[in-house]
Image (spheres, coloured by chain):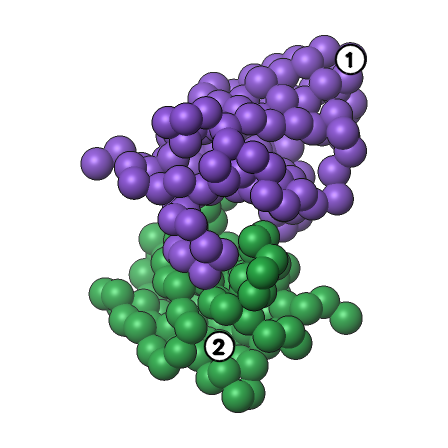
């Protein structure tokens, strides 16, 4: 049983570009959450997707958008990249409901130059 | 004041020592999570608690809902336990995890 997978593992982009990160949840999970973790800091909640809709959003600008597909996999899109977007982007999957255990993927390390 | 407070912030111990990391929170929660993050790595969920105590190998997690406090214990600590340990909570009708600042644990051989 595969756990949460993310792709790509590492990514280097230039300021102003756009990026798409991908996440496949653990088998049986229907909810995907995305987090941004800057170097030396704790993760910050970006948003959560359930039933192909954004259920809740953290304090991130509209440049950050997402999508969830019928197979529960999810994408995180970031437009007009800034240097400050350089971070580890973590995806977590869980079953419906906020109290269920979250399983984390290995993360995608994004570097914006 | 942060909603989730962890202590200590940093902890260095010798191999074999009994380790305790504490977490206090100030909000009503539906669950408390203990997670582990190795340097440069992703995050691994260790425990999810809503009451009582859980044990997995050398790791034990307890929670006291009335006192809004949880502890993570590591018995017979080993250098491979060196990591950042994070306490996070979920609040009713709020789907995000609210994270503590983490405890950086170093176990010396």
Q: Quadrant of the N terminus of chain B?
A: bottom right
Give the total of numbered labels: 2
Residue receiving disc 2: B70
Q: Chain of mark 1?
A: A
Q: Position of residue B4 (x, y in %)?
A: 63, 68
Q: Quadrant of residue B3?
A: bottom right
Check the image and report above or below for B84 versus B63: above
Residue receiving disc 1: A16
Residue drawn 45% across and 60% down? A99
Q: Nearer the viewer, residue A94 or B7?
A: A94
Determine if residue B45 is in view: yes
Chain B drawn in what color?
Answer: green
Residue drawn 66% across and 27% down? A65
Q: Quadrant of residue B55?
A: bottom left
Alpha carbon distance from label 2 to label 1: 44 Å
Chain A drawn in what color?
Answer: purple
Residue drawn 50% across and 69% down? B30
């Amino acid at each position: 049983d595969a756990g949460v997978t993310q792709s790509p593992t590492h990514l280097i982009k230039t300021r102003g570009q756009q990026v798409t990160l991908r996440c496949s949840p653990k088998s049986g999970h229907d909810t995907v959450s995305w987090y941004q973790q800057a170097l030396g800091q704790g993760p910050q909640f970006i948003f959560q997707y359930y039933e192909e809709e954004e259920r809740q959003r953290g304090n991130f600008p509209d440049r950050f958008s997402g999508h969830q597909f019928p197979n529960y996999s999810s994408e995180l899109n970031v437009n007009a990249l800034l240097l400050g977007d350089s971070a580890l982007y973590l995806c977590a999957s869980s079953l419906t409901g906020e109290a269920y255990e979250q399983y984390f993927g290995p993360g995608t390390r994004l570097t914006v130059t | 004041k942060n909603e989730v407070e962890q202590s200590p912030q940093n902890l260095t111990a010798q191999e074999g020592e009994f380790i305790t990391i504490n977490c206090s929170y100030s909000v009503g929660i539906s669950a408390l999570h203990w997670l582990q993050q190795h340097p440069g790595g992703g995050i691994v969920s260790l425990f999810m608690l809503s009451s009582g105590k859980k044990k997995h190998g050398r790791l034990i997690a307890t929670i006291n809902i009335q006192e809004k406090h949880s502890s993570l214990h590591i018995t017979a600590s080993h250098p491979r336990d060196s990591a950042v340990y994070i306490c996070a909570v979920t609040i009713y009708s709020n789907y995000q995890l609210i994270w503590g600042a983490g405890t950086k644990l170093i176990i010396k051989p």
